[in-house]
Image (cartoon, rainbow, N blue to C red):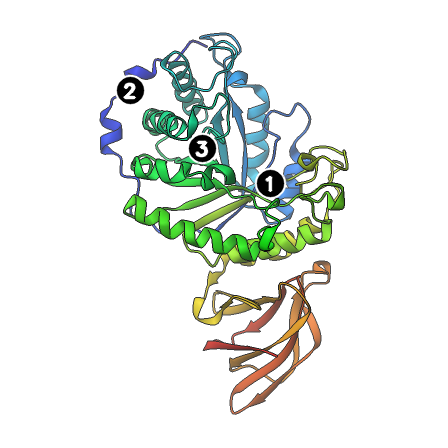
Amino acid sequence: MGAFDWRALSAALCVAWCAHAQAQAPAFIVGVGTHLLNAETDVRPALAKAHEAGIGSVRDDAWWGHVERQKNQLGVPPAWGRYLNALQPLGMSTVLILGYGNSAYNNNAKPAFESVRGGFLGYTAFVTQQLKGRVDYWEIYNEWDIAKPRFGLEGDSKSYLKLVELAAPVVRAQAPEAKVLAGAITAEGIKAGFADRLLQGGVMNHADGLSLHPYVHCEKSDNGYKPEHWIGWLRKLSARFDAEAGKPVPLYLTEMGWHSTGDRHPCGVSQSTQAAFLARSFLLARTLPAIKGMWWYDLIDDGTDPAEQEHHFGLLNPDLSPKPAFNVLKAIAPQVAGGQFEAAGSLLGGPWAVLLSEGGHQRLAVWADGSDTSLTVRVEGGQPGPLKALDLATPEQGYRPIASQWECTAGRCQASVPLTGFPLVIDLGDARGLPFDAAQD
């Protein structure tokens, strides 16, 4: 197929589009990175496992170099069609990354110069038109803030902002039903002010959301690698980002996770801790309304080297057998995706309690970060008897009565609940009396 003349697109598209169209907010997105779009093997078993875990969205790389293998000769790889066909009956949304260099354009340089950017925009127009209606989110590049060559903080932010300004209207012309995500910014870039510079430069005039990769697995000081510290950081960032943009900034965490290398890597955690952190991070993400979704990195371990961190972020082993994190996500994904966060019934700081309600039904996730403790949970309504809960340390057992008992007086019930680092999800049923009250024992 021939090259697409992106310059023929009307500049009026950028003016006519409004990034914050009034629409009903979708459910929170529980997503995962897959690394399967370009696979030559059968991807259906792996995608079926993602669906089994309750994942509602997948993210993958739509490599420029795989579309334009020879200059000005573009074609969608057959593997992409197989991947998208496999997704269709599963009902999961798709995030594809428009990214990376091409050997035919300045030896794989990132599109920071006109000589490369023109080719990138041609590829963008072609692939978004070819996959129109099959991709829900297009993410403009991936981790530009650390991609080589580096031009310094200010130069990198300006060159990326220019790319977004040019690429976003191209995407909208070819796939107007899809959303555009910009950023894909690493934790390093966030700390260095890359996101701030984009927002100050008006990136939200072109994108539907700001995408972040706020990894903290190597933040060992002051427990910075734990989900509770992580959500505090994101809460501060969100407030600052809104102020810089002059409007609410929707955040899409298109990569997030902890790797299960254990003590074989200085930044590793055990498989059990990975599972606990997954549960806590997804629950905590629901407490910050700016976060519209989180894509766990990633679905399948990328290798078997015990000390290589990139090989152990997955929910599944390479043979698709589940790691503990898979079973935890399977247990909580429906509640995380469909539940509404009730701030009035939650405790956001040591111990932790996150209340989610759906269709008149309430569930309360409680845990402690640190030594074992207990929490007295008090609600209006309810019935005396055993407390029913899902222990995410053993999610395969489902909701079941535990040793704690509801004791009720004059329509008010309370129970003393033991806490660990694994959330315990208490089924409150229709005991909707608020405010929820909790006290540390």
Q: Local crowd at mark 1 within 10 Å, few (<14), some, or many (≥20)?
A: many
Under mark 3, the amino acid is: Glu
Q: Residue drawn at (56%, 84%), measured in percent from left and top?
A: 413
Give above or below for 325 relative to 115.
below
Disc 1, SS: loop
Disc 2, SS: loop
Q: Earlier in the sequence, mark 3 or mark 1?
A: 3
Q: Nearer the viewer, mark 2 or mark 3?
A: 3
Q: Where, quadrant-wise, is the C terminus in this rendering?
A: bottom right
Q: Earlier in the sequence, mark 2 or mark 3?
A: 2
Q: Residue drawn at (47%, 69%), measured in percent from left and top?
A: 360
Residue 354, image x and y in percent? 53, 65
Give above or below for 406 relative to 122.
below
Residue 228, image x and y in percent? 55, 58
Residue, disc 1:
297
Q: Local crowd at mark 2 within 10 Å, few (<14), some, or many (≥20)?
A: few
